[in-house]
């Protein structure tokens, strides 16, 4: 287990408040040191701002890009690896225009993430807004190498502030921080074929509390230095190595290959356990199933066991939605719109946070292999939409 991200939330100011960013970076590095002294590796330090249309409301697309580049440069100078500008809400009339500038913003930066809102609570965005978000996905795919820029863009529904995972992260209120985990190995530890589902849930809760109470105590102590602790997102994010695979971990239960019958039941049980601990939590607290970031998911996709429709079904009972899904380069606007509509409807109907991070790969058709060189990706077959 490791901490995937220490995510700091601040108001960045306009013009950019360099002192505030420096303070955020210094606090994050101090917290990182505390964890590493305790034997807990920290993978990244990240910064999230409020939704940028709220503080750049009158800015042109060019001015937003300049601000993003300044924030990126300042963040790196102060030990922050990535920054998120929060969501654009196309359901708000004054924010619609910002969607058109998102492809250039992604293409013109290296470490800046952004999202678009598909609805909140009782309200879904209209179909035209869904089509506009689909066009953003298509344009990012066309103007960034291998469509890789869509790693830094997501469509979101019902995602609250203080989610520590990117691209959905955004900030609200006083300066604060939250923690994201890379902890598929904890799930693997408790998944054995002799366990009934209720026994699995109890074992996972106990293991999480044992492992994470010391991490929580460090965060609560460090919060005395002026940043509010919002909690830990218990989503056990996987990694690209086989031993870090959430799919392989779940298969240890003896329910068959991930994607076959039994998978949904296991996903529901594990998610319930994540949401029933005594820990201070935030964010999704559900299973993350990123196809391009998990060796087991990638293999089951190659075998034809895993499909987009499976992943949508699992989203109803578990975690984050559709994550790092490799799609054909010629996927149509209508197909993307329909897929986003399904994610939005699930989040709206179930009143839960979901997101969609879709990666059309230019020049690739369904069944052909991706060729990403990103160290946190596992190459696999491009998935068909069906």
Image (cartoon, rainbow, N blue to C red):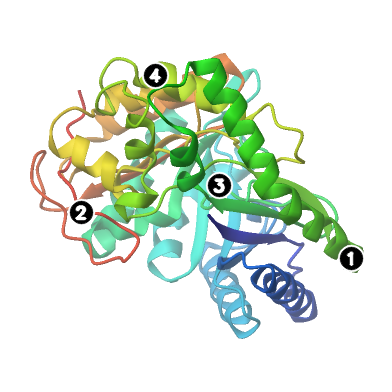
Q: Which residue position holds label 1? A: 226
Q: Are marks 2 and 1 in contact (CB under 8 Å)?
A: no
Per the model, the C-alpha gap separating discs 2 and 1 is: 42 Å
Query: Which circle's residue, 2 or 3, is located before the other in the chain?
Result: 3
Q: Is residue 158 visible?
A: no
Reading the image, the residue beneath label 4 is 264
CA neighbours of label 2 inside 10 A, class few (<14), some (14 to 19), many (20+): many
Quarter holding residue 11: bottom right
Figure quadrant of the C terminus: top left
The mark that comes first in sequence, 4 or 2, is 4
Residue 368 versus residue 189: which sits nearer the camera? Answer: 189
Left or right for 80, reference 354: right
Residue at image mark 3? 168
Q: Residues within 10 Å of mark 4 (few under 14, many from 20)?
A: many
In the rendered image of this protein, does residue 254 appear above or below residue 46?
above
Q: Position of residue 355 (x, y in %)?
A: 48, 36
Q: Specify whether 23 is left or right of 41.
A: right
Farthest front residue? Answer: 194
Find residue 76 and report its horizontal and vertical position in percent.
Answer: 58, 80
> What whole-number distance in Å separates the C-alpha atoms at marks 2 and 3?
23 Å
Provide the residue designation for mark 2: 379
The location of residue 41, given as percent across then percent down, is 57, 67
């Amino acid at each position: 287990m490791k901490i995937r991200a220490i995510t700091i939330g601040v108001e960045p100011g306009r013009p950019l408040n360099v002192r505030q960013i420096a303070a955020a970076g210094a606090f994050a590095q101090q917290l990182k040191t505390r964890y590493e002294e305790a034997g807990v590796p920290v993978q990244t330090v990240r910064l999230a701002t409020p939704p940028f249309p709220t503080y750049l409301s009158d800015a042109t697309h060019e001015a937003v890009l300049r601000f993003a580049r300044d924030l990126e440069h300042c963040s790196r100078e102060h030990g922050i690896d990535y920054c998120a500008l929060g969501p654009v809400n196309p359901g708000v009339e004054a924010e619609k225009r910002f969607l058109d500038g998102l492809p250039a913003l992604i293409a013109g930066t290296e470490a800046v993430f952004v999202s678009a809102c598909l609805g909140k609570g009782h309200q879904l965005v209209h179909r035209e807004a869904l089509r506009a978000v689909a066009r953003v996905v298509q344009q990012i795919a066309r103007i960034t190498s291998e469509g890789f820029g869509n790693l830094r863009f997501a469509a979101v529904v019902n995602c609250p502030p203080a989610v520590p995972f990117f691209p959905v992260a955004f900030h609200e209120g006083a300066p604060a921080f939250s923690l994201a985990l890379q902890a598929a190995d904890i799930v693997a530890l408790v998944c054995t074929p002799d366990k009934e589902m209720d026994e699995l849930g109890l074992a996972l809760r106990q293991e999480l509390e044992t492992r994470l109470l010391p991490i929580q105590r460090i965060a609560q102590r460090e919060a005395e230095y002026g940043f509010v602790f919002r909690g830990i997102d218990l989503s056990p994010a996987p990694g690209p190595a086989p031993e870090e695979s959430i799919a392989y971990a779940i298969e240890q239960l003896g329910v068959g290959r991930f994607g076959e019958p039994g998978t949904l039941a296991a996903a529901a049980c594990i998610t319930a356990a994540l949401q029933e601990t005594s820990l201070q939590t935030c964010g999704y607290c559900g299973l993350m199933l990123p196809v391009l970031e998990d060796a087991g998911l990638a293999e089951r996709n190659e075998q034809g066991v895993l499909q987009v429709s499976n992943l949508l079904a699992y989203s109803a009972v578990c975690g984050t939605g559709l994550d790092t899904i490799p799609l054909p380069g010629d996927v149509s606007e209508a197909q993307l719109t329909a897929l986003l509509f399904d994610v939005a409807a699930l989040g709206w109907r179930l009143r839960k946070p979901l997101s969609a991070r879709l990666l059309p790969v230019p020049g690739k058709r369904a069944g052909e292999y991706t060729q990403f060189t990103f160290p946190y990706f596992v190459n696999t077959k491009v998935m068909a939409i069906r």
